[in-house]
Image: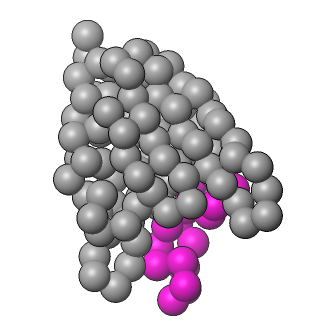
Amino acid sequence: MDVKGVQGSVSFDGEWITVTKRAVGQQSREFRLRAADVTGTRLKPATYLFHGYVQFVLPGSAPAIEASGLMSGGRPPHSDPHSLSIPRRSNEAAAKLIAAVEQARDA
């Protein structure tokens, strides 16, 4: 299960979540999380005007704070390794991915 994001992607194979981020002028960075280790998930759907985001919360860490301002549109900063901004066309796929992660957490 894959979700195409803004400058990256999120994939889930049933056990592992892989967040791949690409910064302008840099190589892709990959962050792997076990679904069983995730304590919470957040999904903010994108609108016609602003990107949304998918975020995974781990034990002992607080969710990244949403940056305010017109350009950020209320998303976590790009430097947060456990979140990814998503365009509007990825809302449905992101909701399915979050549901699958939540189901894997409960199992």
Q: Which of 53 and 13 lies nearest the eye of the viewer? A: 13
Residue 42 in view of the camera: no
Residue at 37%, 46% in the rendered image: 3
Residue 14 % position (x, y)? 34, 18
- Outermost residue to the bottom: 70
Q: Is residue 47 left or right of residue 65?
A: left
Q: Verify whether residue 44 appears in magenta.
A: no
Q: Which of 102 and 92 lies nearest the eye of the viewer? A: 92
Residue 70 in the image: above or below residue 88: below
Q: Quadrant of residue 48?
A: bottom left
- Outermost residue to the top: 107
Residue 66 % position (x, y)? 52, 66
The part of the chain drawn in magenta is 64-80
Residue at 29%, 38% in the rendered image: 97
Residue 4 % position (x, y)? 41, 52
Screen quadrant of the C terminus: top left
Screen quadrant of the N terminus: top left
Q: Quadrant of residue 91?
A: bottom left
Residue 41 in the image: above or below residue 70: above
Q: Is residue 30 left or right of residue 102?
A: right
Please, which colouring scheme is shown? one colour
- Does the magenta stretch mainly form a helix, a strand or a loop? loop
Residue at 58%, 27% in the rendered image: 32
The mark tally for this picture is: 0
Residue at 25%, 48% in the rendered image: 93
Residue 81 % position (x, y)? 63, 45
Q: Verify whether residue 78 appears in magenta.
A: yes
Residue 44 in view of the camera: yes
